[in-house]
């Protein structure tokens, strides 16, 4: 019986984001579908390396129904906006630490997650 592969994406493909992309690419249960970075050259290079799509606007990932899980690996102070967009789009989200750089933003992400899961 073949197991379903989980569609994955990475927002922010600097050093740590490239590691997330590698894992999603190599793991037999996931399929790296897209990477996102504001630096289009870097996004394109990583996409070519891992044979996936790339975008420079994370909202394109949020609206991609094939993507089920998203790693947020942007610089710490920029975690909030893409994480919130992915949570509100119903994605499973992994965020590099720290979650955010403010307690208020962290609490907002928790509330958004609770709303999206009904808990």
Image (cartoon, rainbow, N blue to C red):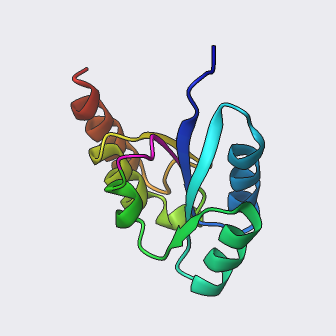
- What residue lies at 62% left-to-right and 62% top-to-bottom? 52
Above or below for 75 versus 113 = below
Q: Residue furthest top?
A: 1
Left or right? Give the position of 76 relative to 87: right
Residue 7: percent from left, percent from top: 52, 43
Give the number of marks: 0
Looking at the picture, how far across and down is residue 117, in whole percent? 28, 26
**Considering only vertical position in the picture, is 81 above or below 94?**
below
Nearest to the observer: residue 81 or residue 12: 12
Point 64% across, 78% down: residue: 44
User: Which quadrant, please, contains the C terminus?
Assistant: top left
**x and y, in percent, of residue 55 in the image:** 49, 73
Q: From the viewer's perspective, tell me whether residue 10 is left or right of residue 68.
A: right
In the rendered image, residue 93, in percent from the top left (x then y), is placed at: 48, 42
Quarter of the image for residue 116 reads: top left
Q: Is residue 105 left or right of residue 20?
A: left
Q: Is residue 50 left or right of residue 94?
A: right
Q: Is residue 2 magenta?
A: no
Residue at the location (39% across, 41% down)? 91
Tell me what residue is drawn at x 37 percent, y 50 percent: 86
The residue most toward the front is 1
The stretch of residues the image draws in magenta is: 65-71
């Amino acid at each position: 019986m073949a197991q379903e592969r989980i569609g994955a994406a990475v927002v922010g493909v600097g050093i740590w984001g490239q590691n997330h992309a590698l894992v999603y690419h190599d793991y037999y249960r996931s399929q790296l579908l897209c990477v996102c970075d504001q630096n289009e050259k870097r996004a394109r290079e990583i996409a070519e390396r891992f044979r996936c799509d790339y975008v420079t606007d994370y909202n394109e990932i949020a609206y991609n129904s094939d993507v089920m899980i998203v790693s947020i690996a942007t610089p710490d102070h920029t975690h909030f906006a893409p994480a919130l967009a992915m949570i509100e789009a119903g994605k499973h989200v992994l965020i590099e630490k720290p979650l955010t750089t403010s307690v208020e933003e962290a609490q907002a992400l928790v509330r958004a997650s609770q709303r999206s899961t009904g808990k």
